[in-house]
Structures are given as C-alpha cells and as structure tokens.
Amino acid sequence: MRASLALAVSLSLASWLATPAMAAQSDAQRPEVDVAAQRLHDKLVGWRRDFHAHPELSNREERTAAKVAEHLRALGLKPKTGVAHHGVTAVIKGGKPGPRIALRADMDALPVTEQTGLPFASKATSTYRGEAVGVMHACGHDAHTGILMAVAEALVAMRENLPGEVLLIFQPAEEGPPAGEEGGAGMMLKQGLFADFKPDAVFGLHVFSTIPVGQIGVRQGPLMAASDRFSIRMLGRQTHGSRPWSGIDPIVAMADLIGSAQTIVSRRTDISKLPAVVTFGAIKGGIRYNIIPDDVEVLGTIRTFDEGVRQKIFADLENVSTHVAAAHGARAEVNIESHDGNPPTINDPALTARMLPSLQATVGADNVIEPSLQMGSEDFSLYGQQVPAMFFFVGSTSAGIDPVTAPSNHSPKFLLDEQALDVGFRALMQVSLDYLNAGH
C-alpha cells in the first residue's frame, strides 16, 4: 500500500483546487471536443446498442473484439489482437512530439438475465460455473467500449496536430476470468502491455448508477477497494435426515460459521479510518430434502483498502472457519484466492489534481463531485501500480430517478441513460487533449 494512502483519504475535493502543482487549464470545453462529440454521437449510440444486444462473458469476448479491431483498422491503425485472449490494443502516433498516455475500456459482460425491456435488450445465454445463465451488459462495459471507439476516431482525425502518442486498451475479463483461467488487466500486463509502450499516465472511466447523468465523480488517492475471493468447504458426514446423530451435519456447521464470521469486521477489524467488508455470496450443498450431505461450500468476497487489514481478515476468516468446524466435529477447507484479487484502485494525487479542471470543463465545476470510498473493485488498479493513473465515474441515472434507489450496476434492471455516452466521450477527450497539449 502506498505511503500516501492515509493522507489522501483525508483530502477533500475542495483542497485540490489549492494544489500549487496543478496545471492551469481552460475552464471551458475544447471546441474540437464539442465538434467531435456532435459528429460521432449517432455512431457512439449505435456501437453501444450493438454491444448491449450481443454481450459476451469474460474471456469470451470474440465478437466484441472483432468489431473493435475492424473499426481500428478502418481508421488506418494497426491493432494488436488476441492480447490476454481477446484484448485489442493500438497506438495512435501524433504528428508532434509529446507525452504518452494510455486509455482503457473494458469489454466483458455479466452472467445476468436482462430485465430492462429495452428494444435492444440482450437475449444472449451462456454457461457460468456449469449453469445456464443469461448474459447482460449489466455494468456498462458496452458504454465504455463504444466511448473509446469514438475517442479513437476523434483522435485519429486530429492526428496531424496531436502531440505525443496514445495507447488504446480494449480489455477483456475485467469482471474476472472463469475459474482456472487467466485474464484481464493482469494478464495483459504479464504479456508485456507496457513493455514497448510505457505511458506517462493512464486514464479510465466507469458509468455509475449512483451518480445522476451529467455529473462526474472523482477523488484522489483511494477510490475503490481491493477485492479477494474465497471459498470454504465444510466437510461433515452424510446420513439420513431422520437420524442426524448418525452423521455430522455440515449445513448446521456452515450456518454457524456464516454467523460467526460477521464478527470479523464488526468486532475484530478497526474500520475507524478505512472500511472493510466480508460477504458470503453463494452457498451450495445437498440434493434431497431428507439427506444430510457430506459437504457444503460457500463462496464470498473480501473488500479492503489497507494491506494490514487485508491480511488480518484472511487470518481471522481461516481461524473462525477452522474452530467453528471443529466445534461441530466437522472440518473446514479454506481457500482465499489472494493471488487473483485486485489491489485497491488509487488515483495518483498529483495527476488527479492536474486533470480535475479538465473534468470541470466538461460538465461544470458544480457537477464534478467527490464520491465516497467505493467497496467495488476494478482491475484498472493494476495499471495504476505501473504508472500514474486516474479513474473517474460518469453518472448514468436519468433525471427524475433517485440514484440511491435506482437499479445498480450488476442489476438485471441496470438502465443507462445514453446521455452518459456523450459525457464520457467529452470527458475522456478533454482529459486526453489537455494532458497531451500541456507545454504546447
């Protein structure tokens, strides 16, 4: 964890405006951004709707990647395909010397059956963890992909006068690769994403249901939590449901464990400065009403911002599992997949302060807000471990709908106001051009 983390938590959005190192930037939208936004609006909406109607799960983004690569080739670029399975990258070289930046969009969808009623709603199905599922862009990655395709076209159109270079990253598997597979940002970096092109900064965005459309959320320092997955298998001894004393009931033992594990955060973790979460998301065991099974399995997630807290929760979860199981005469097998987890998403303080005026120029200073710490996670965080990074939220909930109660990201009813596409495009363009043109 970076040493600036604790300090960054305490900084408010207002204090950024007083940062001496912040570069002076225009308080108005660049005219070339406005022209490009109007010119590309219909294309952007069309791309997003097409991707929404044809979603693909993590590490299965074949059609999406093909559409992206086709578009980049049409722009005269030379995309590299097959990165981390279905990732696509390309470099836009400006006509003038300047810095290097990377722009990232994620492409994968979720195992969710859509319930929005949209005319372009997904009817796609697939399998996930061995079960038949619907597939939906319930997190907005269709919007991210469309926005970056539009940004690519706009930047290519002004390439002759563009300082520096831009690496476009169309990333698969942000939601996490299937069990037993690699993928996502970690695999792209492992395969040398930044080996030949080391950017000076990397930028990304995410549409967000808890922010009204027309607003942007950003904060320096920690923004999103680290994420780790765990599974616990409770091993008992199968017996007839009418004779529980003849076996060891793993269902009762697991129920006890789930209840006891709630004290890990509520009684054993210091959350006075930074929050933490332990959530059980799935439980499976048994097949028939009158058979006590041999075993029960639960799946869950741990969310933290501090490495010390993270490691302590790992130890506490294993300790509680082992001893609760022993108290029932059962045995617990605990697997915490820390090697597959995402670190916290941390916005580089200097970079974020520098680019804040760019976001304010896009939607107005009053519409750039500082969101609370988010317990969701992002593998964009892995890029931020390599180079200075800034990640921001684009409001996606329509006016007249309370963002607090609106269907959230990952909901089957998640509904994106398409005005967010315009805001996201303008913001990413403004940030890119302001950074690249600094000093020119």
Image (cartoon, rainbow, N blue to C red):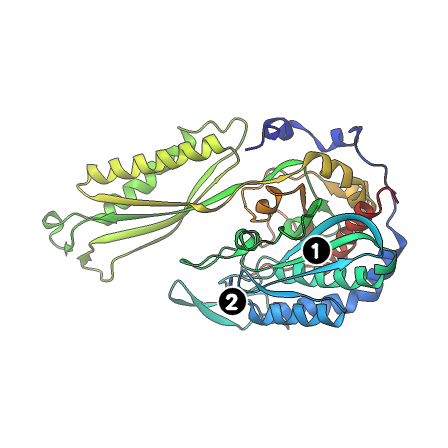
Residue 239 at x, y = what percent? 13, 55
Observer-nearest residue: 392 or 89?
A: 89
State whether residue 424 is above or below residue 351: below
Observer-nearest residue: 15 or 86?
A: 86
**Horizontally, is 440 left or right of 255 in the view?**
right
Residue 318 at x, y = what percent? 32, 38
Going 84% across and 61% down the picture, which residue do you hit? 36
| Number of disc labels | 2
Label 1 SS: strand
- Give the amino acid at mark 1: Leu
Residue 153 at x, y = what percent? 78, 64
Question: Which disc, if any, is residue 259?
Answer: none
Let me know if residue 362 appears in the view. no
Going 25% across and 35% down the picture, which residue do you hit? 323
Let me know if residue 364 appears in the view. yes
Residue 389 at x, y = what percent? 67, 43
The answer to whether marks 1 and 2 mark residues whose Cβ atoms lie closer than 8 Å is no
**Horizontally, is 170 left or right of 58 in the view?**
right
Quadrant of the rendering where the N terminus is positioned: top right
Q: Residue extending furthest front?
A: 196
Question: Which disc, if any, is residue 60?
Answer: 2
Question: Which disc, if any, is residue 167?
Answer: 1
Q: In which quarter of the image is residue 14?
A: top right
Q: In which quarter of the image is residue 425?
A: bottom right
* Neighbour tally class for label 1: few under 14, some 14-19, many 20 plus, Cα within 10 Å: many
Going 49% across and 71% down the picture, which residue do you hit? 125
Question: Which callout, 1 or 2, points at the residue further toward the start of the chain?
Answer: 2
Quadrant of the rendering where the C terminus is positioned: top right
